[in-house]
Image (cartoon, grey):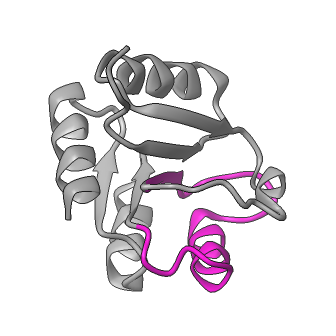
Amino acid sequence: MASSRGYVIVVEDEPEILDLFQDILASEDYRFLGFNHPYQLTNLTTRADLFLIDIMLPALNGLTVARELKSNGYARTPMIATSASDRLLTQAKQSGLFAATVPKPFDVQDLLSLVAAHIRA
């Protein structure tokens, strides 16, 4: 069995999109852990090579999630923001918390290129 290309943790509240991320990442041999609510990340201790975080989440927004992850052991782990809202993606870019942003709907090859680039970095 070939080794994994990296471990990607995805925070996405839409089950269909979470499943889509899993299928896309698995097709390229990435290991995947998905969460559909930010509170599920409490006490996360899993090694991660990259986070994909939706900005519009229930209870906490993705900026808050990223800030908390960075202050709880993931300061050097690259994070990519996803959203269907241009305004929220602009906020994510300006926050300095994210290495990149991905608009929804997204191009699969663009997403995979970003993931590969930031895991290698």
Viewer-proximal residue among 28 and 47: 47
Q: Which residues are magenta?
A: 50-77
Examine the rendered structure and indicate whether residue 94 appears above or below residue 19: below
Residue visible at 67% across and 52% down in the picture = 57
Residue 112 placed where, x, y %?
A: 23, 35
Residue 72 falls in image quadrant: bottom right
Examine the rendered structure and indicate whether residue 101 appears above or below residue 94: above
Query: In the displayed structure, does residue 61 sit left or right of residue 93?
Result: right
Residue visible at 55% across and 73% down in the picture = 74
Residue 23 placed where, x, y %?
A: 44, 16
Viewer-proximal residue among 56 and 74: 74
Residue visible at 15% across and 41% down in the picture = 113
Residue visible at 60% across and 41% down in the picture = 12
Magenta highlight on residue 115: no
Magenta highlight on residue 51: yes
Residue that lies at the very extreme toward the front in this rendered image: 1
Residue 105 falls in image quadrant: top left
Query: In the displayed structure, does residue 11 sit left or right of residue 106?
Result: right
Query: In the displayed structure, does residue 61 sit left or right of residue 108?
Result: right
Residue 54 placed where, x, y %?
A: 53, 51
Examine the rendered structure and indicate whether residue 54 appears above or below residue 113: below
Query: In the displayed structure, does residue 62 sit left or right of residue 99?
Result: right
